[in-house]
Amino acid sequence: MELAECDLCGNRDFEAISQKDRHGEMLETVACRQCGLVRHAVVPTEQELQEFYSTNYRKAYNGESSPGVRRIMRAWKNGTRICRQVQPHLKPQGRVLEVGAGIGCTVKVFDQNGFNAEGIDPGSEFLAFSRDKLKAKVHTANVYDLPRRSDYDAILLVHVIEHVRSPRAALEHIAGLIKPGGMFYVECPNLQAPFARRSRLFHTAHIHNFVPSTLMMLARSCGFQLVQRFGDEQDPNLQMLFQHCGEPQMEIDSANYQRTVHELARTNAVPYTLRLRYLRDRLKKLVGYVDEYARAQRFVDQLIKDCGGLANSPVPSAALANRAA
Ligand SMILES: [Zn+2]
């Protein structure tokens, strides 16, 4: 069977690099022999994707579902981090759009920092929460529904690009939404990060897997220039800020294919300092979990109050049990 051409460079020559996903299920993953972009061998159709997201991935699909408090607190922290990173590069009160806004926390953080912020999400699972509790401007839409009128100062694409059938089509469309000289912030998992163990890497929902080089090649070929990369080589996520310069430049990093395949095949060759770093990060994460359990409900109640939303904190289960007794 002939595979669909590489979304980044158009090549049709691939190397199979894995047959299983992170749960041990069959999932063939390939690397493009020209640019090194890693993706599912068979890219799902739009219809298959819609079925996947409506049945397997998100249970509720009517916008009425409520996210858990720990999830909200994490999303708020992430939104705060992203705003801190991007804000110095934006003009005050600029128009910011998040594509794939999810819970709506990032949109609200930008709004609170003086930007004219809005978000779209095709699934809109948490639409009611975003609107009624956070008072965030989020609505149900697909990015391709938006007319390419170059009227946004910045667009955010956070953990979305790995899920779409054609990252190129998405970025080319987004380029048409941004003002000349405007900003584009993208975040996604980094396939090159150490400790993403090979057997745990691949995920049915992640159609394309990026490394720094492939994300930069793709963005440049869609008319963007790198302004700043946040985090470091060990960070599990790529965090990159680009500027829309309007001059698409297709330059293949020919060393990337060999480098990517080589690094994926490498086993247990992680140096001591990196192992220490890993342990430190794990410990930090564990401490974070404990902190989350203790603080999440209060944090979210206060957040909703601050956002001017309608409070309806659920009755804690302990209180219910006492009442029943
Ligand atoms: Zn390619």
Image (cartoon, grey):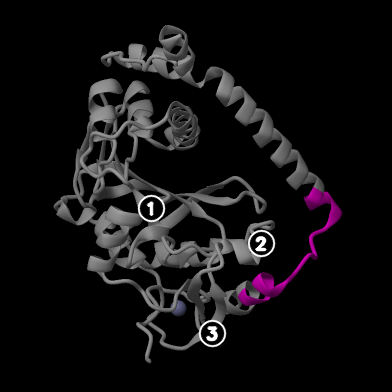
Q: Position of residue 33 (x, y in %)?
A: 52, 84
**What residue did someone put label 2 on?**
197
Q: Is residue 133 left or right of residue 30?
A: left
Residue at 49%, 62% in the rendered image: 203
Seen in the image, is 86 located left or right of residue 20? Answer: left
Residue type, label 2: Arg
For the N terminus, the quadrant is bottom left
Dot placed on the residue nearer the N-terminal end, 2 or 3: 3
Task: Give the alpha-carbon distance from disc 2 to disc 1, as whole Å.
Answer: 22 Å
Looking at the rendered structure, the kind of residue marked 3 is Glu
Predominant SS of the magenta segment: helix
Looking at mark 1, is its residue's CB closer than 8 Å to ligand 1? no
**Residue, disc 1:** 160
Q: Which badge, 3 or 1, comes first in the chain's sequence?
A: 3
Q: Is residue 61 magenta?
A: no
Judging by the rendered image, the residue that carries numbered circle 3 is 15
Span shown in magenta: 261-275
* Residue at figure coordinates x 24%, y 67% from the top left: 46
Quadrant assignment for ligand 1: bottom left
- Residue 269 colored magenta? yes
